[in-house]
Image (spheres, rainbow, N blue to C red):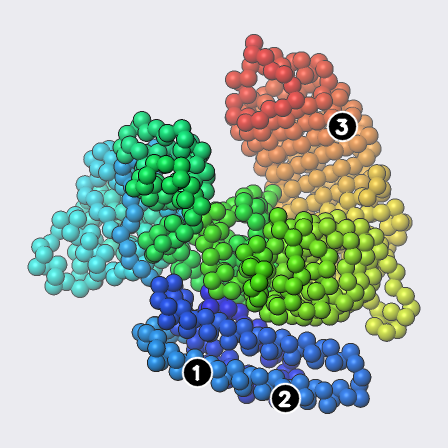
Amino acid sequence: MAESIVAVFLEKLTDLLSQEAFLLSRVEEQVKLLSSELEWMRLFLKDADAKRRYDPRIKLWVSQIRDVTYDAEDVIDRFMFEMNHQQQGSLKCLKFLKLRLVHKLESRIREINTKIEKIKAAKSTFVVETLPAASSPNEVVPHRERRTPIVEEVNVVGIQEDAKSVKQKLLNGEMRRAVVSIVGMGGLGKTTLAKKVYNDNDVQQCFDCHAWIYVSQEYTIRELLLGVAVRVGILSEEERSKMNESDLGNSLRDYLTTKKYLIVMDDMWRNEAWDRLGLYFPDSVNGSRVLITSRNKEIGLYADPQAIPHELSFLTEEESWELFLKKIFLAGSANAVCPRELEELGKNIVANCGGLPLAIVVLGGLLSRKEKTPLSWQKVLDSLTWHLNQGPDSCLGVLALSYNDMPYYLKSCFLYCGLFPEDSEIWTKRLIRLWVAEGFIQRRGEQIAEDVAEDQLLELIDRSMIQVADRSFDGRVKSCRMHDLLRDLAISEAEDTKFFERYESIESTSPVSVRRLTIHQGKKTNSKHLHTSPRLRSFICFSECFQENILRSLHRRVKLLTVLDLEGMPINTFPEGIGELIHLKYLCLRRTRIKRLPSSIGRLTNLQTLDFRNTLIEIIRPTIWKLHHLRHLHGHGVVSSQSVIDKCRNGPLSVGRLTNLQSLGLRAGSWCRGEGLGKLIELRELTIEWTKIAQTKNHGFSESVKKLTALRSLCLDRNVLRVNLPHLLPFSDHTYLYHLCLRGRLERFPDEIEFYPPNLISLELQCWNIEQDPMVTLEKLPNLRFLILSLISSMVKKMVCTSGGFQQLETLELWDLEELEELIVEEGAMPYLKGLLIGACPKMKRLSHGLLQRKTLQRLKLYDLSPELMDELSRIDPEKICLATSIHGWRRTAS
C-alpha cells in the first residue's frame, strides 16, 4: 500500500510543479530532490509491502516511508492553502507574505529530505538488503509466494453442475486445441473442481496422456516443462537433467504432436506463463485440451479468446451448511447432523463465510478440534476474523495473495471499497468519481480519467476482488459489491496502513490521524475526533446520527479536505465557511435537507463533482459557473439570473465556461439559451428538467444539443405534467448517443428514422396526444434493445410489430396507453425478447399468444388490462409460458 501512496503523491507533485511553476520556483531544487528520493524508494516498496505482514523490520521501514510521504503532502497542501488564503487579504503585504511562506516551505521540505536520508540509512543498517527493485519506474515486480494448494477432494459440495459443465467443455468434440479456464475468487474451489474433472473416468479415457502442473506466482519455465515431461513419461531422468529449457520444450512438443493430450495448469497468475509454455503445446487438431485455473478472468480470455471462462460462484446457504457439517461431524458422510443447541451458532458462523468454501473449511476444521459446546462455538463466532487471519496460509492470508499481486494503482481502488457499509451495493458512478477526486487514477495517454477508472474497476472484477451487482442498458457495470471476507481484508489493510479509519473503531480517548474517515450507522458522531485529524482528506458519512456541528468543525479544523460526502444525512444548513476548503474536489449533498448553497461555493476552484440532487435547494447562485474544473454537476433547482455586478466583476458568467464537464443535470433556465451549452463538447451525459418557463425561452437550445456529439445519454424530463419539450434537431451526428429519454409533450411524434441516433440502444418516450402507431418507425432502429413507451392521452388503438422488426430488442414496456386495444407481434419480430411489461392499458383486448410462449422470454408482467383479456390469459397453460421467471398481474389456472 505504501507504494500506491508514494506513487499517487509523486503524480500530484509532478502536476503541481507544472501548474504552479512560478510559486515553487524558489524551492524547485528541494522539491525535485524529494521527488527523486521517493521515486527510488517506491521501486522497493512493491515487494516490501507484501513482506511487511510477517517481518516487523520491513513493516517499520514501510510505515516510515508512508508517514514521510504524508508529511510531504501535508506541507505542500498547507502551503497552497495559505497562499490562497493570503491572496484574499491586503495587496500591500502580499509580496512579503508570499516570500515568508515560500521560505517556510523550503525549510520544511529540507527537513523532510533529511528525514528520508535517515530512513535510507536505517534500511541499510537494520532492514534486509535483498529487497528487489524494479528496473524502471513503470515495471511491476510482483511479490511471489509458492505454496501447496488447499484442495478438499473429500466432502466436495455444490460443484456437481460446475463439474458437468467443465467436463462437457473438455469432451465436446471440438477438434482444435481449446483452452478451458476455471476462474474465480481465491478460496472458491477452482483447484478442487479441476481435480474432480481431471480424475473423472470419462476424461481420463478420452485423452492419450495427462499432466498436472502447479504454476503459482513463483515458477521457472524449465521446472514446469520438466513436470509435464515426467507425467507424460518421456525421456529418461539422465536425458532430462542435461536439457535446457528450449531443448526440453522442443522434445515435449514433438511428443505431444502425435498425442491427444490434457494438461492442467493450476493457479495461473500471469499471461507470461501462457506465452512461454503455450508454445510447446501443439494444436494437432485432434481434440487436445489445456485446463487452466486462475483468479484472473483475463488470463483465461488471453489464453483462448474463443472460449468463455467458467466462473465459479459462491455456495448457497444450504450448500454452505452441508459442507460445514461434513467438515465437523462426519467427514465423507452424507448424514452429518448438528446438535440442536449448536445449530443457531453454527448457522451464524457459516453466514459470516459468505458462501466461500475455503472459509467454511477453515472454520469447520477449527471447530472439529474443539469441544462441541455452545460456549466453545460462541468464542469462535466472537473472534472469526482473528481465526481467519492467522498466518500466510490462513483464509485471509490466501485472499491477501490476490491483493499483494495487484499493481499499485489498483490497491488504493480496492481498499477504498472497504469504506462502504457491509453488504452495500456500490454505485459505479459514485465510486469512479470518488477515485478520480482522490487521485487514484493512472494516466493513460489522452484517455479521460473516468474511462481509465472504469477500466480499473473491470480489472478488479476480472481479478475477482469485486463482484458485479447490476449492469446498465449498455452492458456496463452499474453497481458492484464486495464479498464480506474481502471487505474484512480491505479494512484490515487500510487500518494497518492508516489509509482509512472507521469511526466505530476509534477509541474515544485516542487521537485520530488518518487520511480518510467513514462513519456508518449506529453511533453518534463527536466533533472532537476531527479536531485531532489535521491529516484528514476524505470524510464519507453513512450514518443518520450525523450531527451538524461536525460540519462547522470540518471547515474550521480540517483545512485540507479533498472529499466530503454527506449523501442522505439529516442536515438542514451548510456553513458559509466551506469556501475555505480550496482543496475540495468532491462535494455530495444529495438527499439532504439543505435549502441553499453558500455564496462561497464559487471559491472551491478545484471542485470536480458537485451533487445536490433531491435537496430543498430551489435557487442556485451563478457563482457555480466559476468552478472551471467541474466534471460532474447535478442538482435540483434553477440557476438565478446573474446581476450586472457579477458581469462587471467576473466577466460574463455562463455554463459555457465549464468545458471540463462530463455529466450535467440541472433544471432548465436561462443557462440553456444562447451558445454556452454548445461549448461543452466533452459532455457525455445531459439531464435537464424542463419547466413551463423554459418552454417559452429555449432559443438556441436545439442548436447547442446538435453540437454535443460526445453525448452518450440525453434525458429531457418535465417537472410538471404536460410541459412542452423543445423542438429537437435530428441526432444523426450523435454516433455515441446510446440512451435517449424524452418525457413531456412533443410537437409531434418523431416518425423519421433519421431523427434517431444511429447506434441507439435504449429509448424511453413518455409523450402526449400521439395518433399514429409508433412501432412503424421504431421497429426499424437496428440496435435498439430497450424500449419504454408511455403514450398518455394517445389515440392509438392498434400496434403492429411486423416480421423482421425489432431484431435486437430485449425489453419492451408499454404504459398508460388508454385507447390501445391490440398488440400484434408477427412471427419473426422481436426474436430476442427477454422482458415484457404491459400495464395500465384498460382497453387492451388482444395480445399475440405466441409472444408469451417465446423460449427467450424470462420476465413477464401484465396488469390492468381489459377484463376479457385477463380472463383469456388466465386459461393459458402455465407450462406453455416456458422460461418466464416472474409472472404478475393475473390469476392463472391450468386448463
Q: Nearer the viewer, mark 2 or mark 1?
A: 1
Answer yes or no: do the residues labelled 2 and 1 have beta carbons within 8 Å?
A: no
Numbered marks: total: 3
Q: Nearer the viewer, mark 2 or mark 3?
A: 2
Picture quarter with the C terminus:
top right
* Residue type highlighted by circle 1: Lys
User: Taking 821 as reference, is 544 above or below it?
Assistant: below
Numbered badge on residue 312: none
Mark 2 residue crowding within 10 angstroms, few (<14) / some (14–19) / many (20+): few
Can I make out residue 475 in this image? Answer: no
Residue hosting label 2: 103
User: Taking 878 as reference, is 416 above or below it?
Assistant: below
Mark 1 residue crowding within 10 angstroms, few (<14) / some (14–19) / many (20+): few
Which residue is drawn at the image coordinates 70% and 30% (left, top)?
814
Q: Nearer the viewer, residue 777 or 276?
A: 276
Secondary structure of the residue carrying numbered label 1: helix
Which residue is drawn at the image coordinates 68% and 89% (left, top)?
99
Residue 113 location (% of width, % of height)? 50, 83
Q: Nearer the viewer, residue 462 or 568?
A: 568
Left or right of 63? Residue 812 is: right
* Residue type highlighted by circle 2: His
Residue hosting label 3: 817
Can I make out residue 894 in this image? Answer: yes
Asked where in the image residue 188 lies, by quadrant, the reply is top left
Secondary structure of the residue carrying numbered label 2: helix
Residue hosting label 1: 118
How far apart, in angstroms, are the residues tagged by discs 2 and 3? 73 Å
Residue 651 location (% of width, % of height)? 84, 72
Secondary structure of the residue carrying numbered label 3: loop
Which residue is drawn at the image coordinates 64% and 47% (left, top)?
738
How far apart, in angstroms, are the residues tagged by discs 2 and 1? 23 Å
